[in-house]
């Protein structure tokens, strides 16, 4: 866990004020100031929020109160657990500040098969509780869409790709299923914003999912 000296140094490295850090962590400026001075023993949860904010901005913490700016902006997840790692990273990146997860070329059937439905539904519940919104571009006639369907829009079949990409916070993630699952996460606001603008343009042109599909996805009541 980071200490007071690392918090002060990390702020200096990024050029953040205490107010900047307070806004990102939802902690008070006075509380952060006391933590930095060592006037109080910080709760573990508060330190985790502070550390996560710095790490999301590219700070890497080292032993003996050291730190440095990360040189690499690319992270790779590989193997059977790659998609779970991506889904967890989406939640961890957005859970304290809300925001939006957007996905293009999503195949819900593949997602359910890889993640298992119970896990996927739990992640949806967690994102909803954290006020994380989502917009999803999917292929037509996907039978596995999960209500509410107004979070989906349809890509024409000729433009649908089996390789989805995710945009969340400052991150752009690319997913390849073959020969084995592999996710490449680029943590750079410039790339994320460029992809987000392209997504928004496609979203505005894409068709909404017909309401009849929503009825088909709801569990039938037994008589």
Image (cartoon, rainbow, N blue to C red):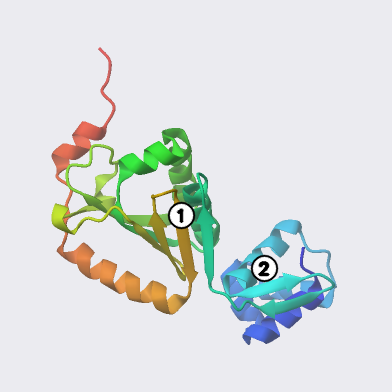
Q: Count numbered badges in the picture.
A: 2
Quadrant occupied by the C terminus: top left
132 in relation to 30, above or below: above
- The residue carrying pointer 2 sits among few (fewer than 14), some (14 to 19) or many (20 or more) residues within 10 Å by Cα, namely many
Q: Which residue is mark 1?
A: 182
Is residue 146 at all visible to an observer of this figure? no
| Residue at mark 2 to residue at mark 1: CA–CA distance | 30 Å
Q: In terms of image quadrants, where is residue 202? A: bottom left
> Residue 163 at x, y = what percent?
32, 56
> Residue 152 at x, y = what percent?
25, 51
Image-based side of 169 in relation to 103, left or right: right
Report the residue at 46% width, 57% height from top. Answer: 183
Q: Which residue is mark 2?
A: 50
Report the residue at 51% width, 48% height from top. Answer: 79
> Residue 21 at x, y = what percent?
63, 75
61 in relation to 130, above or below: below
Query: Which residue is outermost to the top?
Result: 223
Image-based side of 74 in relation to 159, left or right: right
Mark 2 vs mark 1: give the one in front.
Answer: 1
Of residues 31 and 209, which is closer to you in this image?
Answer: 209
Name which of mark 2 and mark 1 comes first in the sequence. 2
- The residue carrying pointer 1 sits among few (fewer than 14), some (14 to 19) or many (20 or more) residues within 10 Å by Cα, namely many
Report the residue at 65% width, 63% height from top. Answer: 49
Of residues 196 and 71, which is closer to you in this image?
Answer: 71
Q: In terms of image quadrants, where is residue 133? A: bottom left
**SS of the residue under disc 2:** helix
Report the residue at 64% width, 67% height from top. Answer: 27
Image-based side of 19 in relation to 35, left or right: left
Is residue 40 at all visible to an observer of this figure? yes
86 in relation to 33, above or below: above
Return the mark for residue 124.
none
> Residue 67 at x, y = what percent?
74, 77
């Amino acid at each position: 866990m980071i200490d007071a000296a690392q918090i002060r140094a990390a702020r200096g490295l990024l050029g953040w004020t205490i107010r900047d850090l307070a806004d990102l962590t939802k902690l008070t400026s006075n509380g952060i100031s006391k933590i930095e001075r060592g006037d109080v023993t910080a709760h573990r949860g508060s330190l985790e929020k502070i550390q996560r904010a710095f790490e999301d901005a590219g700070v890497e913490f080292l032993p003996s109160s050291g730190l440095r700016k990360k040189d690499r902006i690319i992270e790779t997840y590989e193997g059977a657990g790659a998609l779970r790692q991506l889904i967890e990273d989406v939640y961890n990146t957005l859970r304290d500040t809300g925001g939006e997860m957007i996905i293009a070329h999503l195949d819900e059937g593949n997602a359910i098969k890889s993640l298992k439905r119970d896990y996927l539904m739990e992640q949806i519940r967690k994102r909803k509780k954290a006020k994380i919104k989502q917009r999803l571009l999917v292929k037509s006639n996907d039978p596995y869409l999960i209500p509410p369907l107004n979070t989906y829009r349809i890509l024409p079949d000729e433009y649908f790709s089996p390789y989805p990409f995710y945009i969340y916070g400052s991150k752009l993630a690319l997913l390849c299923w073959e020969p084995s699952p592999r996710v490449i996460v680029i943590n750079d606001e410039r790339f994320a914003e460029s992809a987000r603008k392209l997504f928004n343009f496609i979203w505005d042109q894409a068709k909404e999912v017909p309401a009849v599909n929503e009825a088909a996805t709801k569990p039938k009541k037994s008589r």
